[in-house]
Image (cartoon, rainbow, N blue to C red):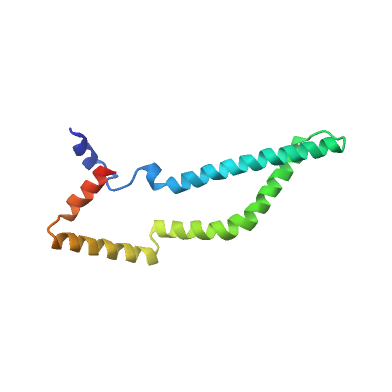
Amino acid sequence: MEDNEIRMTRSDEGKPRFSKAYGFGLVTGALFLLSWTGQFITQYLVVRDEAAQHGQGFEWAQFMAQFFASTFENWQSEFLQLVWQAAGLSLLFFWGSSQSKDGDDRIEAKLDLLLRQHGFEADAVTKELNSQM
């Protein structure tokens, strides 16, 4: 079987690769982990130095409690208010809410009509686009 034949028989034809479909989420997750690691390191250094200035030893249990408290304070003010609005709207659009679904179906129908009017087969165009991805 040729590569094109294998590609056309796959059950997920028309779907983009995982990295392309979820690229924004992957980059956002990586940036989140990077910034959270930065917060962990800087807060660790500050707490360790403050404990040393007061002549006390560093305690991981106390540090972790402070770390998670500051993390959840940040999430409450930023994540729950701003990011969820954007992520929630994106998820609803991705899942095909009634507002976005009608628009997508209408656009798809218009494109198919234009392709037929200009002598192109819509399925052939879709397969060609998928083979280039």
Report the residue at 22% width, 42% height from top: 8
Q: Is residue 62 above or below residue 121?
A: above
Report the residue at 69% width, 40% height from top: 42
Q: Is residue 82 above or below residue 31?
A: below
Q: Is residue 41 left or right of residue 58?
A: left
- List x then y, in percent, for residue 125: 20, 51
Q: How many marks?
A: 0
- List x then y, in percent, for residue 106: 28, 65
Q: Is residue 59 left or right of residue 107?
A: right
Quadrant where the N terminus is found in the figure: top left
Between 133 and 97, the one lying in front of the other is: 133
Quadrant where the C terminus is found in the figure: top left
Between 133 and 72, the one lying in front of the other is: 133
Between 44 and 109, the one lying in front of the other is: 44
Q: Is residue 127 above or below residue 96?
A: above
Between 81 and 53, the one lying in front of the other is: 53
Report the residue at 87% width, 35% height from top: 55
